[in-house]
């Protein structure tokens, strides 16, 4: 068993095949070190002990496949390759979902804010007003809304150009 742990620490494995019984030790004790090093490594447990308890213990330890002896080499290789492909596909899917979730959050943020100022846009303003009105009604508290208008902005924009007008709007928004 110490030799197996040394190998796991020293090498990278895509697939680890272990017998349930390794001398006095259990092959299941190798699962955690393998997963700690590479959570995508496939772990196959081979045993002649086909009891329900053994199968449940293997599942609890996050073993990818539980195979009963005798095993033909012609069965082992295709099974391990299939499990490796499935594991890598799950990881690609997880990464894709994570990226999509990040993109969706960014799109949601963009849909609620003004691109120039970063302030909430009209739609967000109305959603927020509605939510605050509902809260004030539930809590029987007053609600106050303050709005401001930039007088003469169109004349300034026409006279100085849109780039200067954008600077003014950004400056006002930052205040």
Image (cartoon, grey):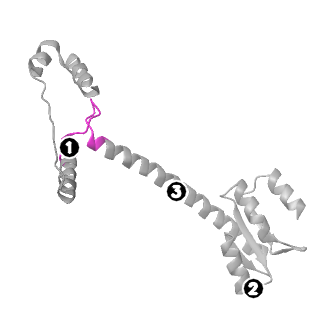
- Nearest the viewer among 53 and 94 is 53
Q: Is residue 2 above or below residue 128?
A: below
Tag 2 or tag 1, which sits nearer the N-term? Answer: 2
Which residue is tagged 2?
Answer: 50
Marks 3 and 1 sit apart, C-alpha to C-alpha, by 35 Å
Does residue 43 show up magenta in the picture?
Answer: no
Give the foreground label among 1 and 2. 1
> Where the C terminus falls, by quadrant?
top left
Residue extent of the magenta highlight: 110-126
Residue found at x 68% / y 80%: 56
How far from the left and from the top, in percent, is residue 93? 51, 57
Q: Is residue 116 above or below residue 12?
A: above
Tag 1 or tag 3, which sits nearer the N-term? Answer: 3
Element type at mark 1: helix
How far from the left and from the top, in percent, is residue 141? 18, 52
Which residue is tagged 1?
Answer: 125
Label 3 environment density (alpha carbons within 10 Å; few <14, some 14–19, many ≥20): few
State the image quarter where residue 2 is shown. Answer: bottom right
Give the foreground label among 3 and 1. 1
Which residue is tagged 3?
Answer: 94
- Nearest the viewer among 77 and 7 is 7
Left or right placement of residue 1 versus residue 52 in this view: right
């Amino acid at each position: 068993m110490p030799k197996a742990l040394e190998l796991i620490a020293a090498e990278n494995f895509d697939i680890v095949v272990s017998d349930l019984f390794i001398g006095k030790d259990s092959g299941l004790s190798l699962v955690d070190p393998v997963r700690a090093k590479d959570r995508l490594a496939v772990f196959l447990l081979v045993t002649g002990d086909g009891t329900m308890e053994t199968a449940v213990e293997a599942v609890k330890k996050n073993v990818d496949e539980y195979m009963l002896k005798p095993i033909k080499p012609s069965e082992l290789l295709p099974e391990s390759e299939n499990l490796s492909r499935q594991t890598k596909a799950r990881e690609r899917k997880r990464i894709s979902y994570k990226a999509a979730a990040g993109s969706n959050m960014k799109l949601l943020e963009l849909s609620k804010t003004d691109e120039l100022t970063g302030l909430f846009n009209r739609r967000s303003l109305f959603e927020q007003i509605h939510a605050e009105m509902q809260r004030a009604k539930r809590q029987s508290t007053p609600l106050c809304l303050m709005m401001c208008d930039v007088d003469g902005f169109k004349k300034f924009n026409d006279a100085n150009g849109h780039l200067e007008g954008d600077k003014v709007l950004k400056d006002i928004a930052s205040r």
